[in-house]
Amino acid sequence: MKKTLFFALTAAIVGLASADEVQVAVAANFTAPMQRIAAQFEKDTGHKAVLSFGATGKFYAQIVNGAPFEVLLAADDETPARLEKEGQGMAGSRFTYAIGKLVLWSADPNRVDAQGEVLKSGNFRHLAIANPKTAPYGAAAVEALGKLGLLAGLQGRFVQGENISQTQQFVVTGNAELGFVALSQVLKDGKLASGSAWTVPASLYQPIRQDAVLLAKGKDKPAAGALLAYLKGDKARTVIAAFGYGLR
Amino acid sequence: MESAAHSADLAAVWLTLKLATVVTLLLLAIGTPIAWWLARTRSALKGVVGAVVALPLVLPPTVLGFYLLLAMGPNGPLGQLTQALGLGLLPFTFPGLVIASVFYSLPFVVQPIQNAFEAIGERPLEVAATLRASPWDAFWSVAVPLARPGFLSGAILGFAHTVGEFGIVLMIGGNIPEKTRVVSVQIYDHVEALEYTQAHWLSGGMVAFSFLVLLGLYTFNPARRKQP
């Protein structure tokens, strides 16, 4: 009995190790499109992408400290470049898979106007942003507010999400009336899913180039290479565009 | 830059101590009657109330954080109540953290006090009654002094547990300097931003603090010493 169990366990472990899986760290703003892409990827190639979602800064720290990720889809272009320089990312594997767009969003359909004038009205208590120290969309929000001359006036109303998903959750639950999130989070099939939004003009912040990189742990994994190639393909790009991202 | 970062750390430490102090005082006030009732009652509800009090020991902080965020939001029952009272909404505020922490640390205060009350037994209170002490008088001049070690343990554990809170604060705090950015959140921020030096200072401080608190609890608590 014990022996059978042992063999069964061994078989299971060996089976897991040899299956074509790729461990992917995905920036939180790319959650919804990546879930869709991963499902198609599995159907088309037989490889399975195991996804973890979170803040890019946190992933960086985890990767440097030995996390088992094989591919990183970052929310910026600096983190992948830094990983490559430090030998954690494979040289020549970096590319921009999406260009992020910042949006001011409220769960209330009547709150945000098409020009974002609501920011000047001050008619709200809390403005949710992602932590600008670690999340690129948070940094972009601070930059845009600075250019609008509203940063000093609104700083006292900031509530910070640990990543862009938590930031959206503060707004979804109505605890913050407004928040800066990624356009991809509030779009469904190319249209605003709910609430009201103002797409922040691209001139107000540095473009959010979101780069992918093959990590050292994925160097010899066929599934990792296949996923990166798949992200450059038409099927994936169609999904990415439908979520409102710019493409290269 | 260096000093700005330093003052942010100090602000987080100060806020954490303030939060833990307020929560501990509130919990002694709220927890004592609950502990007294649990220790003395023969009601069938004892099991239910005891289980509810102990829930935060078992539940992940994310469950509490999630429900508090909904309950205290504009559409939640607590949120509707606070808005009707003209207090606004509780998430992202210091009072919001206080309420969350009271739930979260409740068992750490109630249980030691309850144990201490139970250990007294009926006899001292009966004696007090024969000496014509009113129940109120007996409670204050007999039960409370005899249960002092339990109050001490409860206060220390409640304080320490609130200092160590992280998940709920992360979920309902919004990381606002001097309002909701407590030490544990500040450490998390430092680690995420790769500011390991500052993270080490605060984390090392937490280890030392926690060790000293527990050392004090285990060394000086007479209730524990008496046990065989």
Image (cartoon, coloured by chain):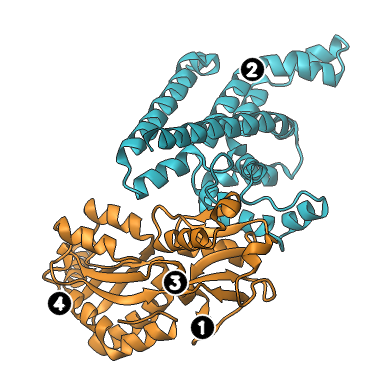
Chain colours: A orange, B cyan
- Residue B172 appears in view: no
Compute the Cα span from label 2 to label 4.
66 Å
Q: Which residue is mark 2?
A: B148
Which callout, 1 or 4, points at the residue further toward the start of the chain? Answer: 1
Q: Are marks 2 and 4 on the same chain?
A: no
Q: Chain of mark 1?
A: A
Q: Is residue A244 left or right of residue A4?
A: right
Q: Could you tell me which secondary element the residue under label 2 belongs to?
A: helix
| Residue at figure coordinates x 29%, y 90% from the top left | A234
Which residue is farthest top?
B131
Compute the Cα span from label 3 to label 4.
40 Å
**Dot 1, how many residues are within 10 Å of its Cα: few (below 14), some (14-19), or many (20+)?**
some
Q: Is residue B163 left or right of residue A228?
A: right
Which callout, 3 or 1, points at the residue further toward the start of the chain? Answer: 1
Please state which of the two labelled residues, at mark 2 or mark 1, is closer to the viewer: 1
Amino acid at circle 2: Arg
Please state which of the two labelled residues, at mark 3 or mark 4, is closer to the viewer: 3
- Residue B37 appears in view: yes
Q: Which residue is mark 4?
A: A222
User: Residue B211 location in percent, x, y?
Assistant: 41, 25
Amino acid at circle 3: Ser
Q: Which residue is mark 1?
A: A188
Q: Is residue A108 left or right of residue A79?
A: right
Foreground: B60 or A140?
A140
Compute the Cα span from label 3 to label 1.
25 Å
| Residue at figure coordinates x 21%, y 66% from the top left | A70
Q: Chain of mark 3?
A: A
Q: Could you tell me which secondary element the residue under label 1 belongs to?
A: strand
User: Residue A43 location in percent, x, y?
Assistant: 30, 88
Q: Are marks 3 and 2 on the same chain?
A: no
Q: Could you tell me which secondary element the residue under label 3 belongs to?
A: helix
Q: Which residue is mark 3?
A: A203
